[in-house]
Image (spheres, rainbow, N blue to C red):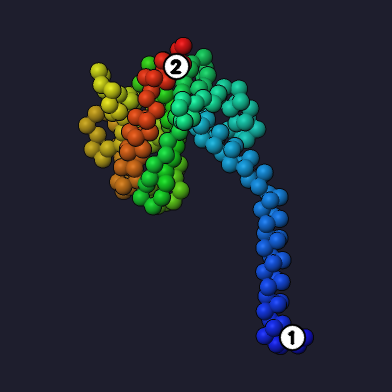
C-alpha cells in the first residue's frame, strides 16, 4: 500500500487513535484506585478543617479521622458525629452555587446545644482568584464563623448567614469583599442545607 494514498492515511489514523485510546484507558484504570483514595483523603481533611484541625500531614489526618469521626445517616442525608477534646461535635456537608460554579463545605456544630458553630470549611469549583475564591483560601474569614449562633433566640428559622451589611453580629459574618454573589451563594447554602438537616431532630436522635 502506498504511504501517500488516502487509504493508508485513514488506516494509519484509525490505528493510532485506537492505540492512544487503549493507552489512556489503561492509565486511567491503573490510576483510578489512587485517585479515589486521594479524593477520599481530601474529603476527610476538609471535615477535619471544619473541626479546626488544619494542615495535618496525610497519615496523621487519616489516623485522626478514624479515631474521632463516625459517619451517620438520617433519611437519605449523611452527616458526621465527632468526639473532639471530650466534646460531641456534629459536622454537616454543605452544597450550593457560587458565581461561576458549585461551592461546598462542611459546618461543624457544637453538639451541646446544636445552635453554636464550632468551625467551618468552604470549598469551590471555579470562583475568581482573590475574590470569590477567598471562601476557600481565607482561613481568617472562615474562623469568623466560630461561635456564631445558628438560630435567633426563640426561633427555629436559620439565622446564620453571610451579609454585606451585618445587622446581627451574633449570627452573621461579613461578606467577602468584592465577591458579593459568591457570598450570597454561601448564605443561601447555609440556610438551605441546615434547614434540610433539621438540627433539633438530629440532636434528639443523638441523645437517645
Nearer to me, 55 or 65? 65
Nearer to me, 98 or 163? 98
Q: Is residue 145 visible?
A: no
Q: Is residue 18 visible?
A: yes
* Spot occupied by residue 102 in the image (x, y as percentages of width and height): 42, 46
Q: Which residue bears the numbered disc 2?
A: 205
Which structural element holds mark 1? loop
Residue 39 in which image quadrant: top right
Nearer to me, 58 or 37? 37
* Residue drawn at point x = 59 percent, y = 37 percent: 41
* Residue drawn at point x = 39 percent, y = 52 percent: 100
What whole-number distance in Å separates the C-alpha atoms at marks 1 and 2? 74 Å
Mark 1 and mark 2 in contact? Answer it, CB < 8 Å: no
Relative vertical location of residue 133 with respect to residue 22 in this rendering, above or below = above
Residue 66 in which image quadrant: top right
Q: Which mark is residue 3?
A: 1
Mark found first going from the N terminus, 1 or 2: 1
Which structural element holds mark 2? helix
* Spot occupied by residue 208 in the image (x, y as percentages of width and height): 46, 11
Amino acid at each position: 500500500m502506498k504511504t501517500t494514498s488516502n487509504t493508508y492515511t485513514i488506516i494509519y489514523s484509525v490505528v493510532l487513535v485506537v492505540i492512544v485510546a487503549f493507552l489512556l484507558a489503561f492509565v486511567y484504570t491503573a490510576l483510578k484506585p489512587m485517585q479515589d483514595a486521594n479524593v477520599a483523603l481530601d474529603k476527610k481533611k476538609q471535615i477535619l478543617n471544619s473541626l479546626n484541625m488544619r494542615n495535618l500531614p496525610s497519615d496523621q489526618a487519616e489516623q485522626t479521622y478514624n479515631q474521632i469521626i463516625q459517619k451517620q445517616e438520617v433519611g437519605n442525608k449523611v452527616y458526621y458525629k465527632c468526639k473532639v477534646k471530650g466534646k460531641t461535635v456534629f459536622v454537616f456537608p454543605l452544597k450550593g452555587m457560587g458565581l461561576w460554579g458549585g461551592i461546598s463545605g462542611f459546618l461543624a456544630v457544637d453538639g451541646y446545644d446544636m445552635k453554636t458553630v464550632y468551625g467551618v470549611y468552604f470549598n469551590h469549583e471555579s470562583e475568581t482568584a482573590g475574590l470569590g475564591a477567598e471562601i476557600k483560601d481565607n482561613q481568617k474569614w472562615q474562623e469568623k464563623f466560630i461561635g456564631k449562633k445558628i438560630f435567633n433566640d426563640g426561633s427555629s428559622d436559620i439565622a446564620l448567614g453571610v451579609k454585606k451589611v451585618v445587622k446581627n453580629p451574633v449570627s452573621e459574618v461579613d461578606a467577602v469583599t468584592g465577591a458579593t454573589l459568591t457570598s450570597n451563594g454561601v448564605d443561601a447554602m447555609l440556610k438551605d442545607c441546615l434547614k434540610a438537616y433539621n438540627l433539633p431532630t438530629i440532636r434528639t436522635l443523638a441523645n437517645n
